[in-house]
Image (cartoon, helix red, strand yellow):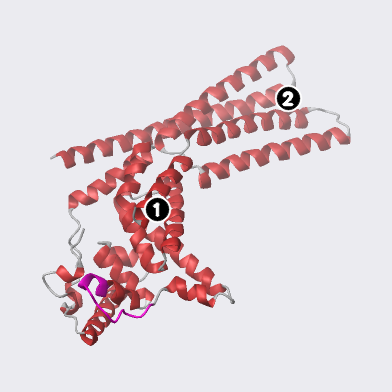
Amino acid sequence: MRPFLFFRREPFARRHDSQIVNTSIPNADLRVDELLAIRCQLGERKAFADLIDRWHEPLWRYLRRLADSNEAADDLVQDTWVRVLRGIAGLRDVSRLRPWLFGIARRIAMDRLRLLYARPAATEDALDGLAAPEVDATLETDLASLEDGLAALPIRERETLALFYLRELSVEQIATLLEVPAGTVKSRLFRARQMLRDQFTVKGVSA
Amino acid sequence: MSPEAFSKVKAQALAATELSLAARLGYVGLLLVSAALTAVVVSLWLTEPVLPSRTQLAFGAMSVIGVAWMSLAVWALTARRPLFARDRVIAGGMAVTFSAVFAAGCVAAVVLTSSAAAFGALATSAVMLIAAVAILQRARRHFADLVYRRQELEAQLRR
């Protein structure tokens, strides 16, 4: 797992866009994913248990950021697994397991948000689903402040930042997953880091 | 237990239900049986020279029902219970065996009755058998490709 934002050697908010290259995914890690996908495609039951063991928590945490309630994240991740289990036999490029998983999770989360938006009388639910709480005034730890900072970001920036720093996807993978150009991903990352830095500056926390 | 750990237990239970081999092969069986029965019904319907309209209607209804069951099985096997490489090999084997038995039955019907309907069913069973053999070969090739890649990756990871 990529080190947490606050423990990076170089403050992420000061890096230039052109420096955004996610090189933290070791080749062996990618091969483990590919092997897992192949074992699943073969129909090995144990492989599905291994797949869930390896990816459930990262998916849950990613969806938790988009849903902002444990119950909602739980529903979304179960839906994600149903779609993964039904779709993995048809996955053509097995080396792209990671972006494929997060792509499914994202589409499911976006579908849910669209449904919430579409319900006219469900404004409060929609706000719950979007999760934009205010930053806690009493910052006890860097971790807590980062969590709050992320939650306060607009959903696009929050999602991009979470995919890049916490889910270890490359800019290109995120671009494919979000169906936007790589430049857009970079600008969202830049904007997100800027916003986080502003928040931390206001709160007196060094990013 | 943390919420994500609890949620993982639920996901593992979900996988056990989703991955039931019996359900997958059940749909393969449904597809084969409904295809054979529909072939027999359609052969009888098309080859009988004079049929009262009520019988025509009954044959039509039975054909529609057969096609509906086939469609359900195909839909389930593509959208709900897709076959994995190993399942495809098993399903291919089932298809070849079933089609061969069906073809043998049709040959017996042709020998015993020499009816046009038996010839029609025999032609359909021959097509089914050829398709089943092709599906089985394709499934075996796909399975072998995946096993080869798996071994390659395992060797790379052991280094």
If the image is split into quadrants, where does the C terminus of chain A sit? Answer: bottom left
* Amino acid type indicated by mark 1: Ser
Give the vertical position of A3 relative to B99 (above or below): below
Of the image marks 1 and 2, the number of the one nearer the N terminus: 1
Residue A34 image offset from top left, x and y in percent: 28, 47
Span shown in magenta: A133-146
As helix, strand or loop, the secondary structure at mark 2 comes to helix
Residue type marked 2: Ala
Q: Quadrant of residue A187?
A: bottom left
A144 in the magenta segment = yes
> Label 1, label 2: how many angstroms apart (C-alpha)?
57 Å
Kindly identify which numbered label has been placed on residue B117: 2
Question: Between residues A195 and A32, which one lies in front from this camera angle?
Answer: A195
Specify the quadrant of the image occupied by residue B44: top right
Q: Is residue A9 left or right of residue A91?
A: left
Q: Which residue is mark 1?
A: B7
| Residue found at x 70% / y 22% | B118
Which dot marks residue B99? none
Chain of residue at mark 1: B
Between A162 and A61, the one lying in front of the other is A61
Residue at (18, 49) in percent of width and height: A28
> Do pointers 1 and 2 mark residues of a single chain?
yes
- Magenta part, dominant SS: loop
Task: Pinpoint residue B35: horizontal percent, then vertical percent.
Answer: 63, 33
Residue A169 rendering spot, x and y as whole percentages: 27, 62
- Please name whichever residue, A153 or A205, is drawn nearer the observer in this view of the structure: A205
Apparent side of residue A186 relative to residue B49 in the rendered image (left or right): left
